[in-house]
Image (tube, rainbow, N blue to C red):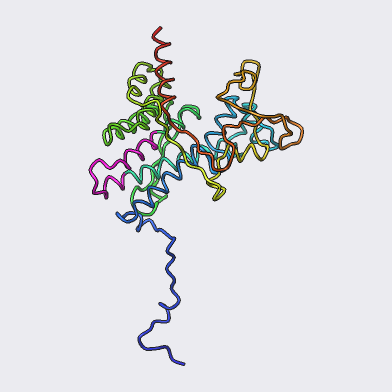
């Protein structure tokens, strides 16, 4: 049989995937919602976590909010402040990589909104810039000074051959970079409370207490910005619930003799239950009950945090 004259045998075999988004299709007005959603999703993975370790859990482990009830040596050495040498892998590696990835995709998305959106002072750009500021804040809080920041192609498909590898940056300078992003967000939307609280947090970390208090002064008490989690897929799971449900981490109490009394204080803001056997069946595990399911959201910024920043500034002022 001969193919019909009006048909192409190659065209018959080509299939368009409606769920596939190429870099070229994202770099359009129609592609903006997908690009923005992807960038926000990357931030959730970097800060909160993809149903597993990221900034939130690693920061809790290394600051003695948690101790490991697991068998993984990478978590044990982080708990002991005895990280493996570079190249052997550490629990914090994923958090660092996820945050850097989110930093890049958030910048790409905010630049695209600036370039393509027809809405003056588009509030979506203010949110993206604020979240980008939080990537710098988290990196400065969670990792020692001399943090490298590299650049890749900011339009079209990523071109790793054109990557500009940045020199290490000190902690205070990284907080400065965060404040720059928060200020830029506020220049787009002056009432953006996420940017206000983020700026206050970065300034507080720098010891600029009165500036921090001024930054959050207009944030209402009932404001809260949540990172969405869902039981739809592992990437969307609440990481603290997922890790504790699997026996990996336990709520600490006076860890190292000078740690905070997270359990014994019986603070109603930190409900917990336990003990039960941890993952290794020997270490007792105490469960943080703030996150009771895979779909529990995680607060990133709130009016309560704003008031605490003001209280810290008042304390420092005497």
From the viewer's perspective, tell me whether residue 307 is left or right of residue 62.
left
Foreground of the two, 211 or 156: 211
**Image mark count:** 0
Q: Main SS type for the magenta part?
A: helix
Horizontal and vertical percent position of residue 95: 52, 38
Vertical arrangement, residue 300 with respect to residue 262, above or below: below
Residue drawn at (36%, 48%) of the image: 153
Vertical arrangement, residue 314 with respect to residue 269, above or below: above
Q: Magenta stretch?
A: 111-133
Q: Which residue is situated farthest in the top direction here?
A: 318
Give yes or no for residue 126 being in the magenta stretch.
Answer: yes
Horizontal and vertical percent position of residue 230: 52, 45
Horizontal and vertical percent position of residue 218: 32, 24
Give yes or no for residue 290 being in the magenta stretch.
Answer: no
From the viewer's perspective, tell me whether residue 30 is left or right of residue 134.
left
Foreground of the two, 164 or 273: 273
Vertical arrangement, residue 11 with respect to residue 211, above or below: below
The C terminus lies in quadrant: top left
Q: In which quadrant of the rendered view does residue 212 lie?
A: top left
Horizontal and vertical percent position of residue 171: 43, 26
Residue drawn at (76%, 36%) of the image: 281
């Amino acid at each position: 049989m001969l193919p019909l004259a009006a048909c192409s045998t190659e065209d018959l075999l080509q299939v368009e995937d409606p769920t596939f988004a190429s870099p070229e299709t994202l770099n359009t007005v129609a592609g903006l919602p997908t690009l923005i959603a992807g960038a926000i999703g990357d931030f959730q993975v970097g800060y909160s976590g993809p149903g597993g370790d990221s900034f939130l859990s690693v920061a809790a482990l290394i600051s003695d909010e948690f101790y490991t009830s697991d068998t993984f040596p990478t978590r044990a050495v982080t708990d002991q402040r005895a990280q493996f040498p570079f190249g052997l892998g550490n629990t914090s590696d994923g958090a660092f990589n996820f945050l850097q990835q989110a930093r890049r995709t958030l910048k790409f998305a905010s630049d695209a909104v600036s370039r393509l959106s027809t809405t003056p002072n588009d509030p979506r750009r203010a949110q993206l810039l604020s979240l980008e500021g939080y990537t710098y804040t988290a990196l400065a809080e969670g990792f020692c000074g001399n943090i490298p920041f590299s650049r890749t192609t900011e339009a079209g498909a990523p071109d790793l051959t054109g990557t500009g590898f940045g020199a290490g940056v000190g902690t205070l300078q990284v907080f400065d970079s965060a404040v720059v992003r928060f200020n830029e967000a506020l220049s787009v939307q002056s009432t953006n409370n996420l940017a206000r609280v983020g700026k206050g947090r970065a300034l507080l970390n720098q010891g600029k207490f009165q500036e921090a208090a001024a930054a959050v002064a207009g944030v209402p008490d009932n404001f809260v910005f949540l990172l969405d989690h869902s039981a739809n897929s592992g990437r969307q799971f609440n990481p603290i619930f997922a890790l504790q449900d699997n026996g990996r981490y336990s709520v600490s109490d006076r860890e190292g003799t000078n740690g905070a009394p997270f359990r014994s204080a019986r603070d109603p803001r930190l409900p917990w239950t336990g003990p039960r056997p941890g993952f290794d069946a020997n270490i007792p595990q105490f469960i943080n009950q703030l996150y009771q399911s895979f779909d529990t959201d995680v607060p990133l910024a709130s009016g309560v945090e704003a008031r605490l920043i003001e209280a810290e500034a008042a304390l420092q002022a005497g």
